[in-house]
């Protein structure tokens, strides 16, 4: 069977069209063609089919090849257009090429037809690939710009939320349970947590959240969340899970994989208001040169593929091109933030993977997510620990450049019994430590501060007293990366906005660990540089 080829012949002579068709068929093409000889019939043909090529006569009664060329180009169709004429002189041919034709042939020399067609089909495919690549690069640049803006806003907003949460939680502690005032503080706390979840989604899209990656078997992750998905999307939708055999391991944050599955399942549910089928599938995948041509954002290598597909209403191309934009939604007002798929996109990209979407109106939607594989066996899941409010009496140096957050945290810690020395930036933190070096038991330092950032301040403090324990606080991932690169070690860290309980728990853990590790010949407790990365 020959290579498929769909051709429109712009030709008034049926015999000449048959001659061209025979030449192409004997040249190795499996031909599907249509002959037209007027503007109306050409437009109808272009409306009704997806064509590979136009072969056109130059001079016809009542209709010319140049008119046909104008119609094709006016429609924006990037179809190869070749003139095949018996009357076309060189000057006319050059003029036709300038107006958008790809080539011209004389009807008496059709031996050039097959190589000319093959060349133009190949060139057209390369143009489409370049155009698709340019569109994808433009899309990535747009997402990067939106991500930087959104991430910066979310970072600043988290500082404000941290202060609000701090004061509200202190109000809850001060007011007896069941009172009207306690109820109001609880409502403030709940809404602040809701806002924090929104900023977390924005940071996910912007790839600025802190991850806690582990070696995962995606089949196990899917199994753990399936029961929750049944409750989430209801009984009208059938969930079908197709786990891949001998599935490779991937390095991923299990909580983020769960978030991805929930977001895609909710999106599928909304696309199937009358019920349908949701399919979750995993497979091993190897990305080579051919796949890279289709997915230029990918890198060659081994991947684990997670596919989530539905039998819903589907989407047109214009919608598919925008679905990962934050706040873009096709749902009616009040039904969704437009952050679900943006979160999926950001999480996959932050895991150094890529995502492919296929959808057509009325034919459902399929998401294929590719995560880089890694060697080894899955890590044992960590047990979830209940965070409790824990008190103390030690002297703490607390540094943060955001006034509201620093003030609320200072008040929090004093309510818990701690003595607090507040600092507005890293340089002030170093000076205050020098004055109280023997008495300060713990440092709580924001990573990004003016004059002197948290890691540099800690480096100077550690030169004075290496064993002092430290907790870093941060708004988003870009602050963490240079710190980890600088120290070549992980960090004990709280992601903003943190709660009163999570702050007290992290502090108590650091203080108790330091107290349990005395330095020989010293009155101080010894701790190594930070050893774990936490997100609270």
Image (cartoon, rainbow, N blue to C red):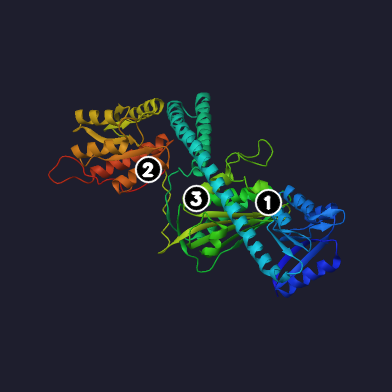
Say whether residue 322 is left or right of residue 483. Answer: right
Tell me if I can see residue 248 in this picture.
yes
Q: Are marks 2 and 3 in contact (CB under 8 Å)?
A: no
Mark 1 lies on residue = 98
Q: Position of residue 354 (x, y in %)?
A: 52, 54
Q: Which quadrant of the figure contains the N terminus?
A: bottom right
The disc, 1 or 3, on the residue closer to the chain's N-terminal end is 1
Residue 504, image x and y in percent? 36, 37
Residues under labels 1 and 2: Cα distance? 56 Å
Badge 2 is on which residue?
Answer: 480
| For discs 1 and 3, the disc positioned in front in the rendered view | 1
Q: Earlier in the sequence, mark 2 or mark 3?
A: 3
| The furthest residue to the right | 61
Residue nearest the observer in this picture, 187 or 45:
45
At mark 2, the secondary structure is: helix
Q: Position of residue 358 (x, y in %)?
A: 64, 55
Q: Is residue 373 above or below residue 413?
A: below
Q: CA distance from mark 1 to mark 3?
A: 43 Å
Residue on which the image places disc 3:
349
Q: Earlier in the sequence, mark 1 or mark 2?
A: 1
Closest to the camera, between mark 1 and mark 2, is 1
Q: Please tell me whether residue 486 is drawn above or below residue 45 in the rendered image.
A: above
Cα–Cα span, label 2 and label 3: 17 Å
Mark 3 surroundings: few (<14), some (14-19) or many (≥20) residues within 10 A:
many
Q: Quadrant of residue 55?
A: bottom right
User: What is the crowding at mark 1: few (fewer than 14 residues within 10 Å), some, or many (at least 20)?
Assistant: few
Label number found at residue 257: none
Residue name at image x 73 percent, y 69 percent? 109
| Residue 85 as seen in the image, left or right of residue 237 | right
Give the secondary structure at mark 3: helix
Query: Where does residue 21 sit, x and y in percent of width and height?
Result: 78, 69
**Are the two marked residues, 1 and 2, in contact with CB atoms closer than 8 angstroms?**
no
């Amino acid at each position: 069977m020959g290579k498929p080829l769909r051709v429109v012949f712009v030709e008034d002579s049926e015999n000449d069209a048959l001659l061209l068709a025979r030449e192409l068929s004997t040249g190795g093409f499996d031909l599907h063609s249509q002959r037209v000889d007027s503007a109306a019939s050409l437009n109808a043909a272009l409306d009704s089919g997806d064509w590979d090529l136009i072969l056109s006569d130059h001079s016809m009664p009542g209709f010319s090849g140049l008119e046909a060329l104008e119609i094709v180009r006016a429609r924006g169709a990037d179809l190869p257009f070749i003139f095949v004429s018996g009357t076309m002189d060189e000057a006319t041919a050059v003029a036709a090429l300038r107006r958008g034709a790809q080539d011209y042939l004389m009807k008496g020399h059709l031996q050039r037809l097959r190589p000319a067609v093959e060349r133009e089909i190949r060139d057209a495919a390369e143009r489409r690939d370049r155009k698709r690549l340019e569109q994808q690069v433009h899309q990535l640049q747009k997402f990067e710009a939106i991500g930087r803006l959104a991430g910066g806003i979310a970072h600043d907003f988290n500082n404000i939320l941290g202060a609000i949460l701090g004061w509200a939680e202190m109000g809850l502690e001060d007011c007896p349970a069941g009172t009207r005032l306690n109820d109001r503080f609880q409502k403030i706390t709940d809404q602040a947590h809701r806002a924090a979840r929104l900023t977390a989604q924005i940071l996910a899209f912007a790839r600025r959240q802190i991850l806690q990656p582990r070696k995962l078997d995606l089949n196990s992750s899917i199994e753990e969340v399936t029961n929750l998905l049944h409750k989430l999307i209801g009984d009208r939708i059938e969930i079908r899970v197709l786990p891949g055999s001998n599935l490779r391991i991937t390095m991923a944050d299990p909580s983020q994989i769960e978030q991805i599955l929930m977001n895609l399942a909710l999106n599928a549910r909304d696309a199937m208001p009358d019920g349908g089928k949701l399919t979750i599938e995993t497979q091993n995948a190897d990305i080579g040169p051919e796949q890279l041509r289709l997915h230029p954002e990918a890198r060659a290598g081994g991947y684990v593929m997670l596919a989530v597909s539905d039998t819903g209403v589907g989407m047109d191309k214009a919608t598919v091109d925008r679905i990962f934009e934050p706040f873009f939604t096709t749902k009616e007002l009040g039904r969704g933030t437009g952050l679900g798929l943006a979160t999926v996109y950001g999480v996959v990209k932050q895991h150094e993977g890529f995502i492919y979407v296929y959808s057509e109106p009325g034919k459902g939607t399929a998401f294929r997510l590719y995560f880089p594989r890694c060697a080894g066996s899955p890590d044992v899941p960590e047990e979830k620990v209940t965070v409790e409010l824990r008190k103390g009496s030690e002297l703490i140096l607390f540094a943060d450049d955001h006034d509201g957050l620093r003030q609320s945290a200072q008040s929090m810690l004093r309510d818990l019994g701690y003595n607090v020395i507040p600092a507005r930036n890293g340089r002030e933190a170093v000076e205050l430590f020098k004055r109280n070096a023997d008495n300060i038991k713990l440092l709580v330092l924001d990573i990004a501060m003016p004059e002197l950032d948290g890691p540099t301040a800690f480096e100077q403090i550690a030169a004075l007293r290496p064993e002092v324990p430290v907790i870093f606080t941060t708004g988003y991932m870009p602050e963490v990366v240079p710190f980890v690169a600088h120290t070549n070690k992980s960090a004990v860290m709280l992601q903003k906005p943190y709660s009163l309980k999570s702050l007290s728990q992290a502090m108590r853990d650091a203080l108790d660990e330091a107290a349990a590790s005395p330095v020989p010949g010293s009155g101080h407790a010894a701790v190594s540089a930070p050893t774990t990365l936490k997100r609270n």
